[in-house]
Amino acid sequence: MTWIDVTSVALFVTVGVVEAKRGFFPAAIDLCLVLLGLNLCKLLTGVVASPLGSRATAFGVLFLFCVVVTAVASSLIDTYTKWEIGSFDSAVAGIVGVVVGLAVAHGVYHMVALTGAGGHALVGRSLLAPEIYELRTIHGIGDLLRHLGGGPSITDQVRKSQQ
């Protein structure tokens, strides 16, 4: 287990607990803004890399800026709109917070991988790299949500198996 694995687990737990305390609406805003910012940072890294020296530094600065803007924006929105989804608000917010933590951990893995051969070796030794850096967990959660409530019903499956 490498330091990047420990950092990732700390991010899941910390962001999950913080989002559970804040509620679902700020957690959902954080998730949307972090995913959008992560993609924008990956696109803009090449443009910003020359003034900042390296691609890893450029991505790190952009991603840190993205995380700070996300935290400020969701806090401001939460201050002026106190929306809740009922009794499951904190539980669902905690789950969404863990996904936000996954996205932030992916950003950390990406920054480490951009540092060069040493970074690639560290990511390669990481136990959680397939789940976080290769996005298997986030894609798995997306597949789960996409099929939630859809697909054949139990009666349709029984009829099909009887034929």
Image (spheres, grey):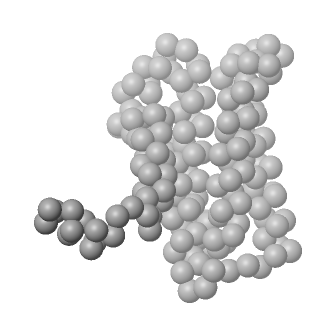
Give the residue drawn at x 57%, y 76%: 90
Residue 123 in which image quadrant: top left
13 sits left or right of 83 in the view: left
41 sits left or right of 91 in the view: right
Residue 16 in which image quadrant: bottom right
Specify the farthest residue to the bottom. 87
6 sits left or right of 94 in the view: left
Image: 51 above or below 30: above
Residue 81 in which image quadrant: bottom right
Q: Position of residue 95 (x, y in %)?
A: 51, 65
Image: 79 above or below 53: below
154 sits left or right of 72 in the view: left
Give the residue drawn at x 13%, y 66%: 162
Q: On the rendered image, what quadrant is the N terminus found in?
A: top left
Question: Relative to the observer, which residue lies in front, 76 or 4?
Answer: 76
Specify the farthest residue to the left. 162
Give the residue drawn at x 14%, y 62%: 163
Question: Relative to the observer, which residue lies in front, 159 or 89?
Answer: 159
